[in-house]
Image (tube, rainbow, N blue to C red):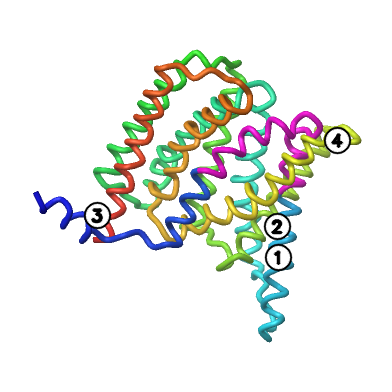
Amino acid sequence: MQTPSVSLSSAPRLPAGVVLALAACYVIWGSTYLAIRVALVSLPPFFQMGSRFLVAGGLLAVWVLWRKRSAGVASVLPTAVQWRNALVVGTLMLGGGMGLIATASVHIGSGLIATCVAVVPLMITGWGLLWGRRPGRLDLAGMGIGALGVLLLVRGESFSASPASIGCALAATACWSLGSVLSTTRMPLAPGPIGFASEMLCGGAVLLAISLGIGEQPAWPPQPAAVAAWLYLVVFGSLIGFSAYLYLLAHASPALASSYAFVNPAVALALGSVAAGEAVTTQEGWACGVILLAVAMILAQNRRRRG
């Protein structure tokens, strides 16, 4: 009777930084899908995302430079190669990933958007195979069960959308996944927060360039709810959530870092039910349970790897 408790207590624990970063990606990012939809009332997709990441990246860069100058460090700016990497990765993850997510959000609900993003771990595994990464057995099983949970969730009554919008969401996950793999293999960013800032600055600039090119026109003055949602996306979605994700990419397995994608649909669905009055069916509740089981399996694989 005592063997299970001994086994659990002796199992290697996740570092506190990884746990906090996971919590940020699970909860905060699950809520950003609803915030994106609220901000769309006044701020069109690419303008909303571009301004969000430019402001967040600028604030983070100023904070890093101020801290380093106070400590007497001469320069912490990325090198030319690191800026190039930030431009490529930022274009994929933010320009293609977040820009297309916001575009899809114009027509389909936040819960379905989060569900489409749940294929990220599968795509990351596929891209990673090109660079010799081999997932563990529990990783593969967890991702398979997670995909099953996503399919169950999609078949629920809450989800109805145009094929074009779902296509945008899936294309966004492909861009995001490729950028995630490149940032940890062939195109590393500058170390620490300045690397996060450089990616947000480059990605934000690309998004605003696209916004200008397609002629987006923000509504002026913006509605207060849209402004509040945009500020939430800057502070929580970008400065906290995005930095937490990049931290996970550098300190955890790819499957663990991307496991947020299985939890976000459940969070988005719950918020949609509470804040927007969306109904949650019994089938969708079971689907969320399957998704959480998949996350537990990926966590178990990560612990085994550390052991």
| Mark 2–mark 3 distance (CA, rounded to whole Å) | 36 Å
Disc 3 designates what residue?
304
Disc 1 designates what residue?
61
From this viewpoint, which residue is outermost toward the right? 221
Marks 1 and 4, the one that precedes in the sequence: 1
x 43%, y 21%: residue: 284
| Mark 1–mark 4 distance (CA, rounded to whole Å) | 27 Å
As shown in the figure, which amino acid type bears the numbered disc 4? Pro
From this viewpoint, which residue is outermost toward the bottom? 72
Give the label, 1 or 4, closer to the camera: 4
Disc 4 designates what residue?
222
Q: Position of residue 108 (x, y in %)?
A: 62, 22
Q: Are marks 1 and 2 in contact (CB under 8 Å)?
A: yes
Q: Secondary structure at mark 3?
A: helix
Marks 2 and 4, the one that precedes in the sequence: 2
x 40%, y 17%: residue: 283
User: How many numbered callouts?
Assistant: 4
Q: Magenta stretch containing residue 49, yes or no?
A: yes
| Mark 1–mark 3 distance (CA, rounded to whole Å) | 37 Å
| Mark 1–mark 2 distance (CA, rounded to whole Å) | 6 Å
As shown in the figure, which amino acid type bears the numbered disc 2? Gly
Marks 3 and 4, the one that precedes in the sequence: 4
Q: Quadrant of residue 14?
A: bottom left
Nearest to the observer: residue 110 or residue 140: 110
